[in-house]
Each structure stands twice: as structure tokens, then as C-alpha cells.
Amino acid sequence: MKKVFSFAVALIISLAVFSQQSESVDTTVISKIREEAYQHSKVMNHAFYITDYSGPRLTWSAGYDRAAEWTLNEFKKWGLQNVHKEEWTPLGKSWDIVKSYVAIKSPYYQSIAATPKAWSGSTNGLVVADVMLASATDSADFVKKYKGKLKGKILIFESKLPPPSFSFKPDAKRFTEDSLSKLAVSTDPGDQLLFDTDTAAMNKKFAGLMQMFNTYFMSDKLWTFCNKEGAVAILSLGGGKDGTYATDGSYNFMPKPNSLNIANVGIRTEDFLRITRLLNHNVPVKMELDIKTSIKPQPAKGYNLVAEIPGTDPMLKNELVLVGGHFDSWHGATGATDNGAGSIVMMEVMRILKKLNLDMKRTIRIVLWGGEEQGLLGSLAYINKNVADYSTMKPLRDYDLISAYYNLDNGSGRIRGIHLQNNAALRPVFEQWLAPFKDLDAGTVSIKNSGYTDNESFDLVGIPAFQFIQDELNYDTRTHHTNADTYDELSEDDLKQASTIIASIVYNTANRKEKLLRKPKPNPYGNFNFYLLQ
């Protein structure tokens, strides 16, 4: 028994060593990639043009179009092939802010930091109106309580939100060695974060999500009711603290008949609570607003940005290694960390690999996604058209050709490792590929699932799709979906580090003898509607 056990242990060890030794790592190429990424970096140039120069990149907006045009032109300048826009549905609304001014008029004057909710409407020029404090359990209760009472009013909804807490911890942080070690040894991949391979469970999850949308954002019917009743505008709680506030949408982005938009502006938590306190103390509040937004009358098509570096091996050049991140942003700032950073890095990966003229057997394709913030619309549509039909799981053109998809969408923090997405067989592969980057603080390989972004769209059909472990910096505390998400919140050195590591991993994936091993193919999802907000 002891001899058999000893032999088994020796065999396992030898197989593990063999599997690790089977991964080829060209240190000469990695050195070239490092030099180009650090000594000739263009990451901050990319950052300037897709943030400061282009403005916000809201899906279907003029800012998205400006940034896309510049990016596609850069791809062509670098010599990338098959550069194009790839349109997707569902259709949306092309919406932009033309003017935004909000101020307290009495009991004293003070201007207020505010941003119109995406796809919300306008005021009738500069208006001065009383603020009305409203409360309701749901839309039906609201209609019953306030019918005939809203004309000429600015609405603010009662909130039980406590005052913002004091910040005794720093906004920015990096992973500690202890936290990375725990990630590395964890055997629990966690749940599928957004979708679920069980259709019934997924429908239940989305029913809860829709209930949250209808409760928190109220409903399209409610905003139409307020508009018909003659309300002037709605003041929404932006959340956040210390001057930052969330700038998202009204979730009325789908073209719908007979839908009337009302001006709906998000404001800072501190201002929201101040106004409600005044009203609760029976102090009248009068405000002045001048909100002008534009919505094009015709429905707008969304699109992704696509470009390639063709493979060179006659037998493998039709196979694909995909890289990407979502290109769209919210509109209260310029979307630098969410997800300008991910787009910038993946652009730089393509620039580096093309500039070095490396011999890569498989084709490298970058896809920068639109509509991620509205529910992964761009990546879901791309896969449903090119990779696999979600309803039937029928393979499409690219299904058997893709080796892996690499995604970046967690701010501008440096890469500390990779999430395996519960694909344990690939642990030795990534451990060896990350080994040359210990000096850059990267090396952790975790079994964990990572979702709520576009890698999950690929994972749903069984394609190896990975999100990197990144230092958070101040992403969750300060910049994510807020008015502070600007160029100056980017970490240049971290972006260079990420570009180096991803370019090297992509190179290794492109030249590997076999495609990366896949998990078992998921079951079909039936008639489930992924575009939950249609």
C-alpha cells in the first residue's frame, strides 16, 4: 500500500512538473514587450484622446462616436487589419446634455453640483419652482397620492439614507500579500455573478433585478405620469460622499412609443439630504433649473469596435485570441477608469504586438464593446451573432476558433494575477505565464469567478474568458460611475504594467500548440431574454 501510494504521489508530481514545463515562455520576446511598454508607451496619449478630447462615451451618444472615430483611425495608422464598426441591436436613444444648471434660490442662493440622468428630459428653459417632498411605497401608491398636486413642482423623494460616514480609511488601496494568498489558495469559485447556467435560477435572479430597477428608479410610467401632471423636474439621490456622486441613467434608453421624458437630475448626497431636512423642518425651498438635453428622433444603432493582427501559421491563422473591454462610459465625467483604462490597455496591447512585428500563429482580435453599462449589450449581441446562439447553444462561425478572451474592466490599478473563472485545469498554464512578472507584483492565480462585465458573456457559452485581478486603487470608493472619473485618476505606471503583462499572455496564447482547455459546454438558455431592459 505504501509503495502504491508513493508511486501515485510521484506520478502526480511528475505530471504537474510536465504540465508546467510544457508551456513555452520566450523571455527574449517578453523583454522586448517590456521595453516597448515602458520606454515607448502611448497609454496616456490614448487616455487623453478617449477622455479629455472626446468627452463622455455614453452608449449611442456623440461622445462615443467621437472616441470611436479617433480609435478606429489609430488602429488603421498602426497597420491593424479588418478595422471596422460592428453594429448590434437592440436599438437605443442617441442622447446628449446640451446645458445643465441647478441652484437653490431660497432660503438662500447656492449653486448645486448636478448631472441630468441619461435619457432624461429637459426643463422649459430657465424655471424657478418650489421643491415638493414626496413619498410612496410604489408607483401605484404615488399616482393615488399625488394626482393633481404636481403642477409646477420640483420633486424630491423622501429617503431614509443616513448621513455619509467619516472616512477613517484611505480611499485608495492595493492588495496585500495576505489577501492575494487567500485568493490563490481558495477552492471556492463563488457564484456566477450576473448570469446562471440554470435557466430557472437565472430568470429568478433577473426578476429580482428588475424589481430593484423598478423600486429604485421607479418606472417609465411614473416619469410619464409626472410629466403629464406638469411637474418641472425630479431631483435624484446620486449617492457617494465627499463631493462625488453617481451619474447613471434613467433606464429609459429603449425607444418606446408615448413615453414622455421629464428632467431628472442626480445630485450629491449632502445636497439631497440638506434639501430634505429643510423641507422636513417646514422651511420652503425654491430652486432654479435650466436643463436642456437632446434626443435624436430616430432610434440609434449601437456598435463595437473591431481590429485584428492576422496570424501567420498556415494551420492556425484562422484561430483567434480575443482581447477587449467595454468602451462606453457614463456621462457625468469622461469614463477614465470605467472603462477608459481597460480600453486604453487593450489598445496598447495591440499597438505593442504590431509595433514589434512578432510572429504570432493565431489571429489577435480586439473588440471594444458598446452598451456594457446597459447590460452587456454589445458583447451579448456579438456572441449571439458570431460565437453561439444562447437559446440553443448552437455553435456559430467563431465558436471552434477561439482559444481565449481576455477582458479588463476594474479601473486603472495594476494587474496582480488572473481569475480562472472556475477552470482549474488552466492553473499551471497561467502560473507559468505569470512567472516572469513577479518583479511587477503579478503572479496570483485564483479559481474565482469574475463577472458583471463582458468576459461573462463569453463564459456563458463555454469560451475560456478571463478577467484580471487588479489593485482597486480608488475605483470603488471614488471613481466608479461618478463625476470624479477623469483622466487625472489614472495611474500611468499601472497602465504600463498591465499592458506589458496582457501583451505577453496574449502572445503566449497565440503561439501555444493547442487552444486553451475549455470547461464543459453549458446547457442552452431557452427563450430567456438577455436584453432584460427592452
Image: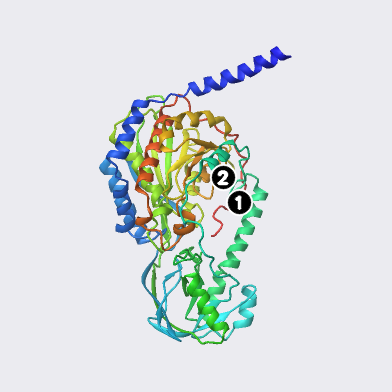
Residue lying furthest top: 3
Q: Which residue is mark 2?
A: 390
**Up-down: is 51 above or below 437?**
below
Q: Does residue 259 show up? A: no
Mark 2 residue crowding within 10 angstroms, few (<14) / some (14–19) / many (20+): many
Which residue sits at x=44%, y=26%?
Answer: 512
**Up-down: is 356 above or below 531?**
above
Residue lying furthest right: 1
Q: CA distance from mark 2 to mark 1?
A: 9 Å
Which residue sits at x=39%, y=49%?
Answer: 341
**Residue 213 placement (x, y as % from top left):** 58, 63
**Residue 266 placement (x, y as % from top left):** 47, 70
Which residue sits at x=66%, y=15%?
Answer: 6
Marks 2 and 1 in Cβ contact (< 8 Å): yes
Q: Which residue is mark 1?
A: 528
204 sits left or right of 294 in the view: right
**At label 2, which amino acid type do we have?**
Tyr
**Residue 227 placement (x, y as % from top left):** 50, 78
Mark 1 residue crowding within 10 angstroms, few (<14) / some (14–19) / many (20+): some
**Residue 479 placement (x, y as % from top left):** 44, 58
**At label 1, which amino acid type do we have?**
Phe
